[in-house]
Amino acid sequence: MAGAEIIGREELAEIQELFSREKVNLYRYGGGNYKTREFEEKFAAWMGVKYAHAVSSGTAAIHCALAGAGIGPGDEVITTAWTFIAPVEAMCALGAIPVPVEIDETYHLDPAEIEKAITPATKAVVAIPMWAPPKMEEIAAICKKHGLILIEDAAQALGASYKGQKLGTIGSVGSFSFDAGKTMHTGEGGMMVTNDKEIYERAAEFSDHGHMHIPGLPRGKDPRRAKGLNLRISEVTSAIGIAQLAKIDMILSKAKENKQRIKDGIRHLENITFRPFSDEAGSQGDTLIFKVRNREAALQFEAHLLEHGFGTKILPEAIEWHYAGIWSHLLGEIDRYRDADLEKLWPKTGQMLRSSICLNIPVLMDDATIEKLIKAIISASEKIG
């Protein structure tokens, strides 16, 4: 799965260089350390932003992004009903009120639904690109019109873009994940990016118990202006990140190539519908999504693929972790959702997700594997009729 497939000598070399020093300190704020600062600087340069701050996970990254943007108790934050649960968990942890809305035909935030969900308590919109860009121009315009903060949790979409601008850089702040299913893989880890100095500093403070990181002051004398948590990344993780970042363009290019070959091999099938894009050229290559007749057909499709050695990615396999209509354990603690039937709040989203197939597209797919997958998809299509 993307970066996780190609962990090797380059990552080991970065770790060995770290351990080759006379005094090894794996703490990111330890004296003489360089790996995390180097990782942040190189990531910021590749993204084309002023600031990047590395943290312990993708969840930590969106948590810091929200905190850095000033999201707090009682703030309503509009987001998509289809996402991994992490950004909604982060909103809840800050005391904010998540307001998921229906997705549109691109499987992203529907701009019309955003407009309908805005209230005097709305403070931000969190756009969550699922391997491809949402309608970012429309979403950004809505945020500007209503004075809302636009945040991008681009954990699933590192390297994707919208009309030539990288996702994560369009809003005030963006976040990324480096776990095993992401474009880059460092074991765990995440990154927050922004061009706003105040957001950057507040996010960095939040990730480090509130330390303000005043130059020239020892940590024991460092002041604080707000509370925080320990969401720090280690020097070892950052060392791996440096090596992975050097491979990012190859990862993106190869995944797109493999995806296009698979898509070309099945586009003649009349009973599957590829998801449309707001900007297909800007989409990532590691995931292919298409819709079938209904939920039963999707489950049959999944079972047939599994019989032929291919799993699905999120849909249908892990929908319960990616659909707000199922999160009663989290949303049920919030007054506005306490007695609600969550499934009925986002029926369009639930129906779309349950009738869709999401396929992982590895970087290391040889010709034989690609042909085998194409054949398995074709035979699954024939089976569901």
Image (tube, helix red, strand yellow):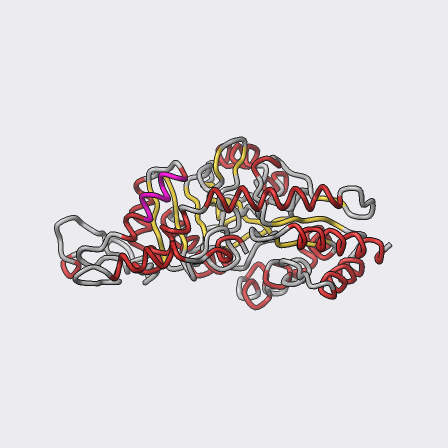
**Viewer-side residue, 105 vs 3:** 3
**Viewer-side residue, 352 vs 329:** 352
In the picture as drawn, the residue positioned furthest to the bottom comes out as 329
Does residue 44 belong to the magenta stretch?
A: yes
Quadrant location, the N terminus: bottom right
Q: Residue 317: where, in percent of width, then height?
A: 66, 63
Q: Quadrant of residue 376?
A: bottom right
Q: Is residue 81 visible?
A: no
Q: Residue 172: where, in percent of width, then height?
A: 42, 40
Q: Along the horizontal axis of the image, is 269 left or right of 133? A: right
**Viewer-side residue, 143 vs 105:** 105
Q: Is residue 140 visible?
A: yes
Task: Give the magenta-colored segment's residue range.
Answer: 39-46
Our reading of the magenta stretch's main secondary structure is helix
Q: Residue at x 76, y 53 (%)?
A: 375
Q: Residue 368: where, in percent of width, then height?
A: 68, 53
Q: Along the horizontal axis of the image, is 257 left or right of 73? A: right
